[in-house]
Image (tube, helix red, strand yellow):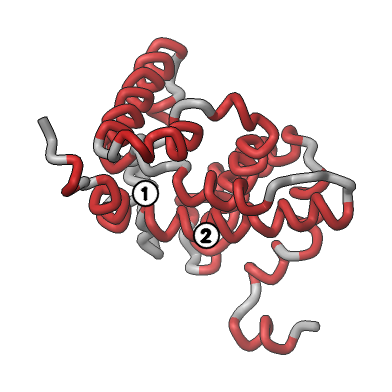
Amino acid sequence: MMDKESSPFFALVFRQKYIQRWGLMKNAIPESLAQHSSECAIITHALAVIGNKLFGKKYDTGKAVTFALYHDVPEVFTGDMPTPVKYANPVIRSEFAIIEEQSAKNLLEKLPPELEDEFRVLFCEKDKDAEVYKLVKGADKLCAYIKCIEEEKFHNTEFSSAKTGIEKKLNELDMPEIKYFMEHFLPAFTKTLDEQQESN
């Protein structure tokens, strides 16, 4: 029985910095899971603010950002499964979903019992906050799209087809928050630092 007074939960969460993403791709810019989670939280916050201010949404911004920060934490046990493998066929996707669920339960078991309820919704009860979870998934895809843009800036064509596929998925989400972000903020990611500083 684990000593609950010495919980490894947050020590495990901090191991996200050792998990590398895009394992099947040649990367000009390495990206850790911790970096991705941070950037996803920033984009999620932006989408929530845009939705609330411009499109009459009522997102709980704090909850959305928290979801984003923790959305990939179970991967400290599984690693980052490449999308072509994870979604290769329904059987693999179904089996990996079971693995992800078990990883989330393993994490929850590392918490003191009096804290478990606060974190269970982040890992095991996402359907209770489906609208916020959809927002995070949209932010997740935007982060992947930005990754493709940044790789292309380094003349890395490895991400070209991924960029096309991700853009299609973003459009299929049909979320005004995402469309606004793509129109007003994405173009700057293609520019150099000097160009970004000169932009209004």
| Residue at position x 80%, y 59% in the image | 183
Query: Residue 88 location, x and y as percent?
Result: 43, 21
Q: Quadrant of the N terminus?
A: top left
Q: Residue shown at 40%/64% (left/top)?
A: 29
Which residue corresponds to mark 2? 39
On the rendered structure, is 95 left or right of 193? left
Badge 2 marks a residue whose secondary structure is helix
- For this orientation, the residue located farthest to the top is 91
The amino acid sitting under disc 1 is Arg
Q: Residue furthest front?
A: 114
User: Which sits in the foreground, 164 or 169?
Assistant: 169
**In this picture, is 165 found above or below 142?**
above
Residue with the mark numbered 1: 21
Q: Residue at x 79, y 36 (%)?
A: 174
Q: Which corner quadrant holds the C terminus?
A: bottom right
Residue 176 position (above or below residue 133): below
